[in-house]
Image (cartoon, rainbow, N blue to C red):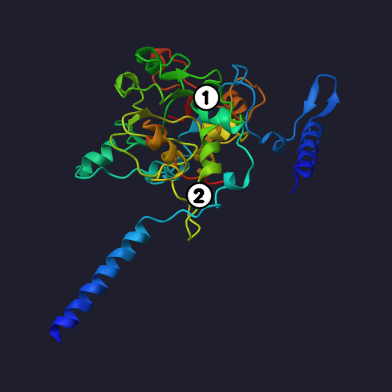
Amino acid sequence: MSKVDQQGRREFLKKSAATTAVTIAPGVMLHSLVAEAAPRTEPVTDKVRWGMLIDANKCADGCNDCVSACDKENGLDLVDMPEGADESLWERQRPRWIRQVKLKDNLSGKITNLPMMCQHCEKPPCVDVCPTGASFRRADGIVMVDRHICIGCRYCMMACPYKARSFIHAEVAEKLTHTPRGKGCVESCNLCVHRLDNGQTTTACQDACKHQAIVFGDLNDPDSAVSQALKKYPSVAIRDDLKLNPGVRYSNI
Amino acid sequence: MTRISSMTLLAIALSGLFSLGSALAAEAVEGTAKADKLEQCVEPTSVMRRNHFEFIKHQRDLTVHQGIRSSKHSLAGCVDCHARKDSGGKFVPVNAEGQFCDACHDYAAVSLKCFECHSTVPGEK
């Protein structure tokens, strides 16, 4: 294809993208969902706060679809056990962004399952303790690690009340383009930030959950599915006593 | 007779070793990278040679902290364009010996840290 042709195509795409936002009435816009599937050009703002509501009642015993989808999406399944490592230790220390937690009520014997990941706190303790500024909260509420700055001290792992962070103990042979990973850095759930930055609006765990236990979306938008669900059903923040205002909420626990 | 047969056996074993060696170090085929077919990079070549690290360093902060992934200066873009394929059509890592990143960094004796974490072959689309 010639350069001129490409230019024409680009202009066409721009125009068609512009026309997908249709004005219904002054101030009311109808946006097409597919029109925004392009890499982000503007910095993220606090107009959006990403969050989740997890219904523990729908979370089925023995199902680990969200965990395996997360592993695949973020290349965690590509991390091999370091040579000579103890296998049982490895199972406890291997990087995992979602932990499966099983709760048992001693009185009634009721078992509750839930996925536990980074809760994306408004006041994250991991950010408080980070000596280098590697652990940070993005404007849109996602708590992340800038691995260019992380020195691997693991203070954040100690500080996190949710045990959400993992440490990469050895060199990683194979990694994905959108999830760089190397020896000596801490990492945790980033709400599939590469998807969000490229215009998608779902996370891998949400897509994988066949029980629809996970609702993900913008907490600041009163019309989003997650805001509507939070309005409708009773929910709690885990360790609410710490006043961290997490972005991940649970119902039926 | 036994001497001749043992010599042939040795020769076969040796040739087997050599062929194994060449299979391991897959040779990148020239002209198989996207960049091989282009006139210039995202900036003029002289600018890229001097400043590529500045570009990707700025880009990394924009991407990680502000979520901007549309800029033309991205490391994923370097890898996507400059990785060559071997004769089997498989991508050869850009930091493999003699490949785009390694060749220059080796010559200039500048150690390359990007690929301790970043992918060395173009990503899944």
Q: Chain of mark 1?
A: A
Q: Position of residue A29 (x, y in %)?
A: 79, 26
Q: Residue furthest right?
A: A25
Give the labeled residue for mark 2.
Answer: B84
Q: Is residue A218 above or below residue B76?
A: above
Q: Is residue B22 above or below residue B116?
A: below
Q: Chain of mark 2?
A: B
Picture residue at 48% right of the left edge, 25% below the top = A249
Q: Position of residue B1 (x, y in %)?
A: 15, 87
> Alpha-carbon distance for marks 1 and 2?
55 Å
| Mark 1 residue element | loop
Pair 1/2: label in front:
2
Picture residue at 65% right of the left edge, 21% below the top = A222
| Mark 2 residue element | loop
Instruction: State which quadrant residue B113 falls in.
Output: top left
Picture residue at 44% right of the left edge, 37% below the top = B104
What number is the disc on residue A234? 1
- The amino acid type of the residue labelled 1 equals Pro
Instruction: State which quadrant residue A201 falls in.
Output: top right
